[in-house]
Image (spheres, helix red, strand yellow):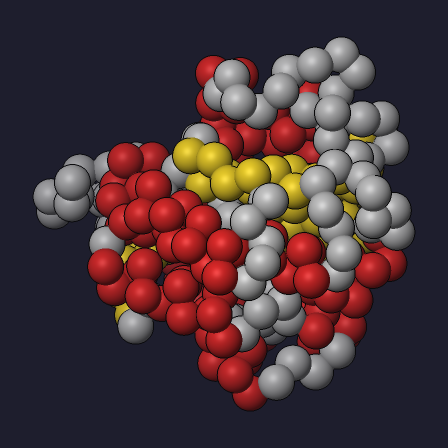
Amino acid sequence: MKPSTGSKITAETVRADFNDPVAVVHYTRAAHFLGLWKSERLLIERFFPDRTAPLLEAGCGSGRVAIGLWDLDFRQITAFDFAEELVAQAKTLAAERGAGAIRFLHADATRLGECLLIDDATPPPFGGALFMFNGLMQIPGRENRRAALRGLQARCSVGAPLLFTTHDRDHSPVERASWRLERLRWDQGKQDPRLVEFGDRYFEDEAGRTFMHLPDRTEILEDLAATGWRGEFDTMRRELTRESAAVRDFSDECRFWVARKG
Ligand SMILES: C[S@@+](CC[C@H](N)C(=O)[O-])C[C@H]1O[C@@H](n2cnc3c(N)ncnc32)[C@H](O)[C@@H]1O
């Protein structure tokens, strides 16, 4: 279902965009040829030291990160996405790579309580969670993003790390200037009418149509605090390492976040 001009972007819009063949090819190619970014690997090795811990990956797409985790010797991986076309690609690639034991599921991060396959056991089963490459920020509506954070929190054990990335509206003078202009458009009611909140963008490029919410740092710290996570570490990717040209081509600069279940 594509949005008609002027109708608000919903989860259904985003899901349809990720199931679109253009997006499926884009993310499947990355899963095949790119694998984990250097920065992702560095933080996984630093904050997920226990290779025996069961991990939950939200928004796994075509399996780029889940298969990367398998290659780092994690063996208890549950990965899910709400775009069924991407999940199908992830299963096929994992089988080809000898990682068929990864549990790939079709589920919506904002409705984890309804997903019977993601165990709601006591104590919670997962020793860590990930929502990589800005997937959390592709959920329209702050309350929905908080629902996803709460759902992940409920399924992790106390002390478990959560690793995710976002953009950062304040990360450069150019970015700050462009958001000052966007603020003016919102103040005057002249923003793209499909957007849900200030900070949202909806655009089209080689990955297809993309909805993205760009937060500032305070917003994320508030969202973590409101959902039972304690922000432990955050930094821009450029401060961690220099990525290959292929990775920089695939992805913009982002902020990495590590939070812990309190
Ligand atoms: C930018 S892609 C990243 C895919 C993959 N993690 C990677 O790094 O290549 C974001 C992913 O989040 C998924 N996603 C967005 N909202 C979701 C939701 N509410 N529930 C589950 N998955 C979601 C999308 O379908 C998409 O596969």
Q: Kindly identify the residue that appears in the image at 83 percent across and 60 percent down.
A: 45
In the shown orientation, is residue 70 left or right of residue 182? right
Note whether 124 is above or below 209 in the view shown.
Answer: above
In the shown orientation, is residue 171 left or right of residue 21? right
Q: Kindly identify the residue that appears in the image at 55 percent across and 63 percent down.
A: 97
Rendering coords of residue 136 (x, y %): 53, 44
In terms of depth relative to the viewer, which is nearer, 128 or 102? 102
Note whether 105 is above or below 51 in the view shown.
Answer: above
In terms of depth relative to the viewer, which is nearer, 168 or 126? 126
In the shown orientation, is residue 77 left or right of residue 9? right
Rendering coords of residue 99 (x, y %): 59, 54
Note whether 253 is above or below 18 in the view shown.
Answer: below
In terms of depth relative to the viewer, which is nearer, 179 or 240? 240
In terms of depth relative to the viewer, which is nearer, 151 or 234? 151
Q: Can residue 195 be seen?
A: no
Rendering coords of residue 187 (x, y %): 36, 46
Q: Looking at the figure, which quarter contains the C terminus?
A: top right
Tally the marks: 0
Q: Can residue 261 be seen?
A: yes
Q: Kindly identify the residue that appears in the image at 79 percent across and 66 percent down.
A: 42
Residue farthest to the left? 4
Residue farthest to the top? 122
Residue farthest to the bottom? 245
Rendering coords of residue 245 (x, y %): 55, 87
Q: Kindly identify the residue that appears in the image at 52 percent across and 83 percent down.
A: 246
Q: Looking at the figure, which quarter contains the N terminus?
A: top left
